[in-house]
Amino acid sequence: MTTNRALLDLDAIPGMFSHHVATSADLIALGLSGSTIEERCRDGGPWRRLQSGIVLLGDTPPSRAQRIQAALTVAGPEAVLTGVDALALHGLSGARLDGPVHVLVSPRRQSRLVDGVFFDRTNTPPVAQLRSGFPVAPLPRATIDTCRRAPSAEHVRALLTSVIREARVSPATLREELTRATSRGTALPRRILAELDDGVRSLAQGWARRLVLRAGLPTPRWRVPISGPSGAHLATPDAWWDVGLAWEVDSYAFDLTPADYAAALTRATHLTAAGILVVHTRPAQLRDEPAAVADLLTSAYTQASTRPRPDVEAA
């Protein structure tokens, strides 16, 4: 690209670039000389250098967005933004905007030291999502990447809780993301995620136990493995009545992911094929519609009691 330098409006150049961040090569391609760029980046000049080869086309301290743009420009076209900035761009209100800009790069990319930026080489780059003009890692990936570098257990717990409750990302999805992540820094989020998941299970189980008492049903066996005539494991329902009735509290407090749905469907298929009557309940129904769930369970228990008991064993 060639431009007549005499006709070039230097004041119009910032508007040509996203967030007023450009490379020296881009500016030279517009027709500026290296000496002109250097002169404008001197103390008191209208521009400033952010890094070697990266120019901020303004004379004020760079904003967070400009720092992100500079980091992505340095990292190259395949780079993906992750970490706290990705969380904020996904709309997570609890994201803290402290710490370095975190950018995922190809392992083939030459490492480069840049102030305030962490370049994270990865063999499993995510498919980027465009947020405010930036290529951003999907929310589950950004969450795990942030947790891996979080300074404390309290920070990890607050972040995971916020993502689960505010953004409706299921624990199963986050666990799946953890299995794909490098092992470095994953022990703490793995432990805290298990604690949160167990807490949700306990809450749903507490509602379920109170509901059984309210319905006047016999006390079931909780989380007991069920096996078929050959001894093969069929499933482990949340509750089991030996008349051949299984109760599944699906997905705990969260929406089912495709993996969750497939697992629930497989369990239900195995139980039903063995002649077991299966009742599915969402946790929100336990909380908001306990009378309706109690009536459903009572009706199902009566129905199961009138049928021949399936040839299964509860371990």
Image: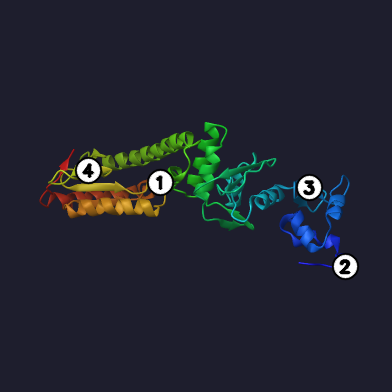
Q: CA distance from mark 4 to mark 2?
A: 82 Å
Q: CA distance from mark 1 to mark 3?
A: 44 Å
In the rendering, which numbered label is found on residue 172?
1
- Asked which secondary structure carries label 1, the reply is helix
Mark 4 or 1, closer to the camera: 1
**Badge 3: residue crowd in 10 Å (few <14, some 14–19, many ≥20):** many
Report the quarter where the N terminus lies: bottom right
Percent position of residue 78, x then y: 59, 55
- Asked which secondary structure carries label 3, the reply is strand
In the rendering, which numbered label is found on residue 7?
2
Give, as a three-letter code, the residue at label 1: Ala
Mark 1 or 2, closer to the camera: 2
The residue labelled by disc 3 is 49
Give, as a three-letter code, the residue at label 3: Arg
Q: CA distance from mark 4 to mark 3?
A: 68 Å
**Badge 4: residue crowd in 10 Å (few <14, some 14–19, many ≥20):** many
**Badge 2: residue crowd in 10 Å (few <14, some 14–19, many ≥20):** few
